[in-house]
Image (tube, helix red, strand yellow):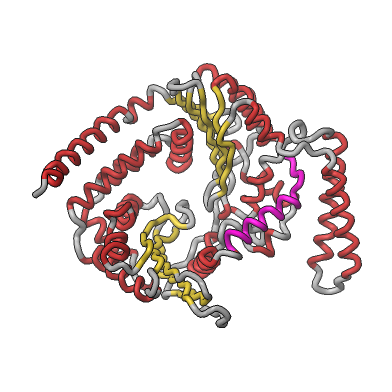
Amino acid sequence: MSPTHRRRPIFVALFVTLFALSLAAQDVASFEKRITVKTLKNGLTVLVMERPEAPVFSFHIVVDAGSAQDPKGGSGLAHMFEHMAFKGTPKIGTTNWAKEKPLLDQLEKAYQEYDFEKRKIVGRDEAKIKALEAKWRALQDQAEQYIKQDEFGEIVENAGGVGLNASTGSDVTRYYYSLPANQTELFAYLESERLIRPVYRQFYKERDVVLEERRMRTDSSPIGRLIEQLLAAAFTAHPYQVSGVGWHSEISSVTATEAEEFFKTYYKPSNMILAVVGDVKAATILPLIERYFGRIPAGPKAPELKTIEPDQIGERTITIREATQPWYIEGYKRPAYTDPDDAVYDAISDILSSGRTSRMYRSLVRDKKIALQAGGFGGFPGNKYPNLFLFFAIPSQGKTPTDVQTAIREEIERLKNEDVTDEELNRVKTNAKANLLRGLANNQGLAIQLSTAQLRYGDWRGLFQEVERIDKVTKADIRRVANKTFVANRRTVGIIENVPAGAAKGGN
C-alpha cells in the first residue's frame, strides 16, 4: 500500500470530525439565539436572523404558489406574474401615472374585446379581429410613452443591491436580493409596494418575452420537448403534467386580467414567508417590516389543489425520433415530501448520483463507458405533491438508449436486492450535513433555506430535522423503498432516438 493510500483513512476521519464540529456550531440552539419569528396581524410570517459578519443583509420571499397553481387553460400564469412583479407600481416605473393608468385600463378593455372575437368558432369575422388588434396595439404604444424602463431594478442597483432575481417553480415562487445594512427601509418599501400595488404595464410585450423563453427552453430544445412530453404522459390529472413554462397556445392567450386574479388569489400575506438575514437587529427591523408589510390586505390562505393523481396502472413510453443527441429518461411515481420515507428517497438519490463515487457515474460512465452522464433524483417537477423519481442517461457515441436502459435497470435491481455498503450509507449522511452547511454559509442561502423550511414544515427548525431524518435511514429502508417504488406500473419512459437527418419524426 502506498503512503497516499495509508494516509487517506486519516484524512477522511479528520474531515468527518471537522464536519461534526462545524455542524455543532450551527445547531438549532445557536440559531434560536439569533432568529426571531413573528406573524403580522395580516398573516405574513417573518423570520429575522441576526448575522452581523458584514454590513449587508439578504431577504427572501417565498410564495406558496407556482406553476401547479396555474388555472385551467392558463398555464404559465405564475411565471407571467413573476415577470410583472418587476414592472413597478403607480410610483415606480412611470413618468405620469395619472395619464398612464387610463391608457392601461383602455388597453385591457380593448384586448378583452379582441380576445373574445379571436376565440369565436362560429361567426368569426377576420376583418373585425384585425381592427380590434390594431386598436389594442395602438393603445399599448400610447402607454409606452409613460414608462420608465427597468426603474425598479435601477433603484435597487443604485442603492448597492446585488442579486436581484426571482424564480417560478412548480410549487413556489421566490423573490430575493441583497442590500447594504443601511438600506432596510428601502427594501421594506420596495417589496411591500409591489405586493400591494403591482402594475401590469407592458403585459403583452412581456408575454412575448415568455413565449421566447418557451421557444428557447422547449420548442427548440430536444430535451425540453422530451421532458414536456414525459410529464404530459406521466401525469393524467395532476397539474404537474404541464411544464412550468406552459403550453404555447395558453401563454399566448393569457391576459393582464387573469394575471391580476392569480395575484389576488395567491399573493396574500398568509400565503407567503419573508426571511431577512444579515447585519440587522430584530428589535429594529421588525417594526419597520410591520409598518410597511402590514399594509398588505389580509386574506385567507389560498386553497390547496383538489386534484389527486390517480394510481398508474401501466408503463407509459414516449419516443422522439430525430437527428440529435439521444437521451434516455425513466420516471417512477413517488410520494410528496411529507411522506415518512422522504429522507430515504434523498438517500437513494445521493447513492446514485452524488459525484464521481456514485453508482450511476461509476457504472455507466466510468466502467461501462456507455454514457456521457447519468444520474437519478426525486422531486421532479416539484415535491409538494406526489411526483417523479427520475433516472437519466446520455448515451456515449455509438451507444443507444436501449444500452443505457439496461444498465440503469441493473442498478435499480441492485438497490432492490442488495444492501448498500456501510461506506455508501455513511457518505450519504456526511453529504447531508455538508449540504446543510453549504446552504448556511451566506446570508442569501440562509434566507432561502429558513423561509423554505418555515413554509414546508411550519417551523424553520425543519431544516435541521431533514438532516436528522437522513441520519436515521437504514440499509433495509433503502431496499424496502426501492422495491415499493421502482416497479413497471409506476414507470414512464422518455426516449430521444437518433435518426438520420430528414427521417420522419414520430413517437408512441
Residue at x 17%, y 51% (from the top left corner): 422
Q: Specify the quadrant of the image occupied by residue 482.
A: bottom left
Please say whether residue 294 is visible from this viewpoint.
no
Location of residue 429 in the rendering, given as x and y in whole percent from the top left corner: 26, 45
Name the residue nearer the viewer: 43 or 214. Answer: 214
Residue furthest top in the image: 284
> Residue 214 magenta-drawn?
yes
Q: Position of residue 467 (x, y in %)?
A: 32, 42
Image quadrant assignment for residue 469: top left
Mark yes or no: residue 464 visible: yes
Relative to residue 72, is residue 38 depicted above or below?
above
User: Which is more toward the observer, 213 or 80?
Assistant: 213
Q: Main secondary structure of the magenta part?
A: helix
Q: Identify the residue shown where x is 21% and y is 66%.
A: 417
Above or below, 489 against 133 in this view is below
Residue 321 locus on image (x, y percent): 51, 77
Residue shown at the point (27%, 48%) measured from the top left: 428
Q: On the rendered structure, is 147 left or right of 67?
A: right
Q: Indicate whether residue 285 is drawn in magenta.
A: no
The image shows residue 416, relative to residue 203, as above or below, that is below
Q: Residue at horizontal 35%, vertical 71%?
A: 404
The magenta segment: 198-218
User: In the displayed image of the protein, which residue is found farthest to the bottom?
Assistant: 504
**Camera-side residue of 290 and 495:** 495
